[in-house]
Amino acid sequence: MKDSYLDVRLLVGLVLGGLIAVGGLWLMPQLWRMEADVHKEEATRWWPFGEALREGFLRSIPVAIIMCLFLELGGIANLFEKLLTGEASHLARQLSVIFWIPALVMIPVFLGVHLFNQPKIVVPPAARDEPGAVVLWWSSRKYKKKA
């Protein structure tokens, strides 16, 4: 062990991130089929950004779960980097970078699914024909202006 202590913030983040990743993976089949138990009326009450962004967010949750999983794996590798010495520590550092790169690449993918419903390959099949949040928002603006 390099240091005589572990960073508590890293451990708390790993535990919370692990819970989110495991819970997300458990819900992934339902989310992929867009069958998750999300009640529109209840969810819309607390969602402050409008229905278009809520729909986009629901479509992008599977991408966010995979992104969270990569961040979690990178965090675990980072923890091992702090615990180990020598070549093992260097290998753990390389693993953390290898896991964090896909997570960073997935940020624009998440935004693309959320806002534009693109790329279709990562959009849940049940939602591939729906317009993106930007299109929904823009059409709702046009409708409000006419009324």
Image (cartoon, grey):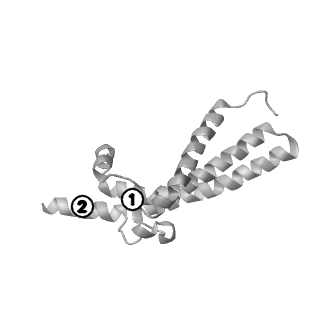
Query: In the picture, residue 3 is in which quadrant?
Result: top right
Left or right: 112 as drawn, with respect to 39: right
Furthest toward the top, the residue is: 4
**Residue found at x 74% / y 28%:** 5
Give x and y (percent) for residue 42. Answer: 30, 47
Local packing at callout 2 (Cα closer than 10 Å; few below 14, some 14-19, many 20+) is few
Furthest toward the right, the residue is: 86
Q: Earlier in the sequence, mark 1 or mark 2?
A: 1
Left or right: 110 as drawn, with respect to 94: left
Give x and y (percent) for residue 69. Answer: 60, 52
Q: Amino acid at mark 1?
A: Gly
**Disc 2, SS:** helix
**Residue found at x 67% / y 49%:** 73
Q: CA distance from mark 1 to mark 2?
A: 14 Å
Q: Which mark is residue 133?
A: none
Q: Which mark is residue 140?
A: 2
Left or right: 118 as drawn, with respect to 133: right
15 lies above or below 67: above
- Quarter occupied by the N terminus: top right
- Quarter occupied by the C terminus: bottom left
Q: Which residue is mark 1?
A: 56
Q: Amino acid at mark 2?
A: Ser
Q: Are marks 1 and 2 in contact (CB under 8 Å)?
A: no
Please name whichever residue, 24 or 132, is drawn nearer the observer in this view of the structure: 24
Give x and y (percent) for residue 124. Answer: 46, 66
**Disc 1, SS:** helix
Query: In the picture, residue 19 is in which quadrant?
Result: top right
**Residue found at x 56% / y 58%:** 106
**Residue found at x 35% / y 68%:** 131
